[in-house]
Image: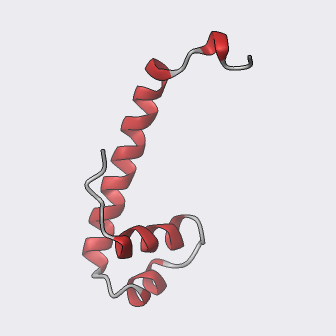
Amino acid sequence: ISSIHSDRVILAMKDYLVGGHSRKEVCEKYQMNNGYFSTTLGRLIRLNALAARLAPYYTDESSAFD
């Protein structure tokens, strides 16, 4: 459901969000423009919010611990 397909961009987001690297380090390492990084991060944040809002409709709490 994501419009983010580039391996380079996905790895950059992983390094930033999971690895804790700075935005500057990630942009330099993956040769990304800071503006594009910000735009992509915004898309990812909106996607996360959408998934969080949809999750209750896909959770069957009665079988969660079976």
The percent coordinates of residue 13 (x first, y second) are: 44, 68
Residue placed most toward the observer, 37 or 51:
51
Residue lying at the far top in this picture: please name it: 62
Q: Residue at x 58, y 65 (%)?
A: 18
Residue lying at the far right in this picture: please name it: 66
| Above/below status of 34 relative to 6 | below
Q: Is residue 32 left or right of residue 12?
A: left
Residue lying at the far front in this picture: please name it: 66
| Above/below status of 61 relative to 46 | above
Count the numbered circles shown.
0
Q: Residue at x 39, y 83 (%)?
A: 27
Q: Quadrant of residue 44?
A: bottom left
Q: Is residue 41 left or right of residue 35?
A: right
Q: Quadrant of residue 7?
A: bottom left
- Quadrant showing the C terminus: top right
Q: Residue at x 30, y 60 (%)?
A: 4
Judging from the image, the colouring scheme is secondary structure
The percent coordinates of residue 64 (x first, y second) are: 67, 19
- Quadrant showing the N terminus: top left
Q: Residue at x 41, y 36 (%)?
A: 51
| Above/below status of 64 relative to 21 | above
Residue placed most toward the observer, 7 or 57:
7
The percent coordinates of residue 53 (x first, y second) are: 41, 29
The percent coordinates of residue 11 (x first, y second) are: 45, 72
Q: Is residue 62 left or right of residue 15?
A: right
